[in-house]
Amino acid sequence: MSVRKRTWTNGDGSQGEAWIVAYRDHAGARRFKSFDKKRDADAYHKEVWVDVRRGIHTADSTSITVAEAGRQWVEGSINAGLERATVDGYRQHLKFHIVPLIGAAKLSQLTVPAVRLFEDRLARDRSSAMVRKIVRSLGSILADAQERGLVAQNVVIASAATAGRIAPPASTGASAASSRSASTSPPPTRSAPSSPTSTATAAGRCC
């Protein structure tokens, strides 16, 4: 990994310059990122060095947006055979709450502070129960993206752990719906265990 200065001559004869951070990610791919100021390049260099060693780095150049990841999450839920009401709930969370506030951000740019800011913005005009549901949906979007190899870490889980809250389920599609329904439904009695049909129905009610 290195930080180096790049200079060039513009068409009008003026000199241009940028600071380039060059490194290899945890998969061995060569990556570059440029900055106008050396201090920004140095800060990014330190951050990337730590993340690459931990195996949680995703390059901006290969990252998709939260909105695109959300669309893939909804499509995956449909393919998993989730009930229509459940999928419609996911679409509403994505369209009306997630995309307007954080949809343009790349997955690689999401951090724990960014998630906390997202929660704060949600809380301005939404109930606490709704905020929790939307943040869980964002966590499921990131879990789905992890399974697709699109992001290295789920910062929603990291945010919940940092704040001492229960983390959202690290699963997607039908398994995510099942996890949420299990957390909100009373435990089955010994004489009447839940059947696959009843679980699917509960999953439809939970979101």
Image (tube, rainbow, N blue to C red):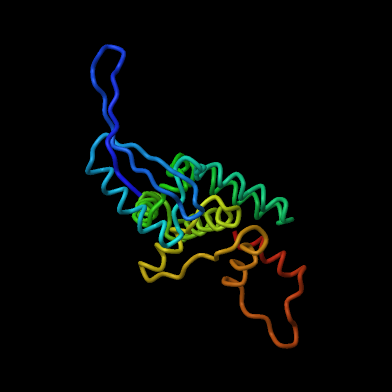
Judge whether 187 appears above or below 141 on screen.
below
Q: Is residue 167 above or below residue 75?
A: below
Q: Residue at x 44, y 49 (%)?
A: 24
Question: Which corner quadrant of the image does residue 33 belong to?
Answer: top left
Viewport quadrant of the C terminus: bottom right
Q: Position of residue 83 (x, y in %)?
A: 71, 56
- What residue is at 61 percent from the left and 68 percent from the top? 179
- In this rendered view, identify the residue nearer to me: 126 or 1: 1
**33 w.r.t. 193: above or below:** above
Measured as percent of width and height from the top left, residue 101 is found at: 43, 43
> Residue placed at 57% from the left, 71% from the top?
184
Tell me, yes or no, if residue 96 can be seen here. no
Residue closer to the observer: 56 or 4? 4
Residue at (61% x, 50% y) in the render: 73
Residue 128: where, in percent of width, then height?
42, 60
In the displayed orientation, state which residue is furthest to the bottom. Answer: 190
Q: Position of residue 49 (x, y in %)?
A: 35, 55
In the picture, measured across the screen, residue 29 lies left or right of residue 7, that is right
Between 68 and 192, the residue placed more toward the observer is: 68
Task: Give above or below for 123 relative to 190.
Answer: above
Question: Front-most of 34 and 172?
Answer: 34
- Residue 59 seen in this snapshot: yes
- Residue found at the far top of this picture: 12
